[in-house]
Image (tube, rainbow, N blue to C red):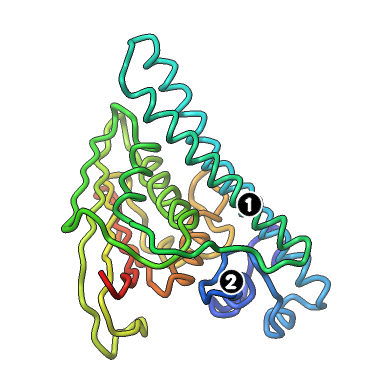
Amino acid sequence: MTNSGKVTDVDEDIILKGCSPRCEDGIADLFMAEVQPPFRGKCGTTAEAVLEMQKLHFSILAHELNNFLHCIQNSIYMAKDGLKDNSGEVESLLEYCERAAYNSVHLVRNYSMFIKGGAGNCEASEVDVVDIARTSAKMLLHDKRINFLFRTDNNAEYVFGGETQLYQLFFNLLKNAKEAMVGNRITIKIDISRTSIGTGHPDSLMPGEYSIIKITDSGAGIDRHSIQYLFDPYFTSKKTGTGLGLLTCLWIVKSHKGVITVDSEIGKGTIFTILLPVCARY
């Protein structure tokens, strides 16, 4: 890691091994870290490697908590306006606050357990990504400047994983889409469908049924040079960015045995595509 904070010469596989160890149920937990020997070699001494990993973990904790707290703050602001107008949306907005608060508590609890030497608790279960995507959009995209579109082939799409982590995934991607706004208007679309993956997939996905999640925005777009570094720790092209949101997304998708890709063009917008394996009985 350089003095500027950017990690250099560290392979993705090394970072993933260092930051996404396994939970007892087989789902990788984003924040339970162990320092692998290759990573130690890149950083120098074991102590230096541990220190750098701790810095990265706490930076991500602050980043993700900020996302959830932003949702609480935004929902409370809208609820207050709703009370003035005697709006029927107030109950829903308060439920969004409750959900964001729950996710925050769960996030901090996992960190606390790790610091105390525990294994953490992923609480992996069958979760509906359609419901998580729709709820995340309602929490983040309640803005008259945003034209939001939502399309799905199924009313529900279940994957096996961590609910809080999947909320983090959508929060980060939707927040990025919102911040790509040029002028005072932007269109953001979520499209969820299903596909079958056979053998020999270029990303080494296991054969089976997968949920395809596409998050598209009509914003500023990303240049080709930046795209190759998007998932690197601390890389950002935004003045107020941390370079941690997309890294978090990568870890979450990898831990759910999926893949995430990006396609973008300056002036036309960006598409993030995520493939996640669906539960066998669905």
**Where does residue 281 sit, x and y in percent of width and height?**
28, 73
- Give the left or right position of residue 96, taking residue 65 as reference: left
Which corner quadrant holds the C terminus?
Answer: bottom left
Quarter of the rendering containing residue 199: bottom left
Q: How many badges with numbers are in the image? A: 2
Please identify the quarter of the rendering in which residue 87 is found: top left
Disc 2 crowd, CA 10 A, few/some/many (<14, 14-19, 20+): many
Q: Secondary structure at mark 2?
A: loop
Tell me: 226 left or right of 241. left
- Is 16 above or below relative to 235? below
Task: Kindly identify which numbered label has been placed on residue 61.
Answer: 1
- Residue placed at 52% from the left, 77% from the top? 26
| On-image quarter of the N terminus | bottom right
Residue type, mark 2 in image: Ser
Give the distance between the C-alpha atoms of the residues marked 1 and 2, in whole angstroms.
14 Å
**Vertical placement of 83 versus 169: above or below?**
above
Whole-percent x, y for residue 5 in the image:
68, 59
Q: Nearer the viewer, residue 281 or 192?
A: 281
**Which residue is identified by label 2?**
20
Q: Residue at x 34, y 42 (%)?
A: 137
Q: Is residue 1 above or below residue 173?
A: below
Q: Which of the pair 66/2 is nearer the observer?
A: 66
Q: Is residue 80 left or right of residue 159?
A: right
Q: Secondary structure at mark 1?
A: helix
Q: Residue 30 location in percent, x, y? A: 57, 64
- Please report whichever mark, 1 or 2, sits nearer to the chain's N-terminal start: 2
Q: Nearer the viewer, residue 126 or 67?
A: 126
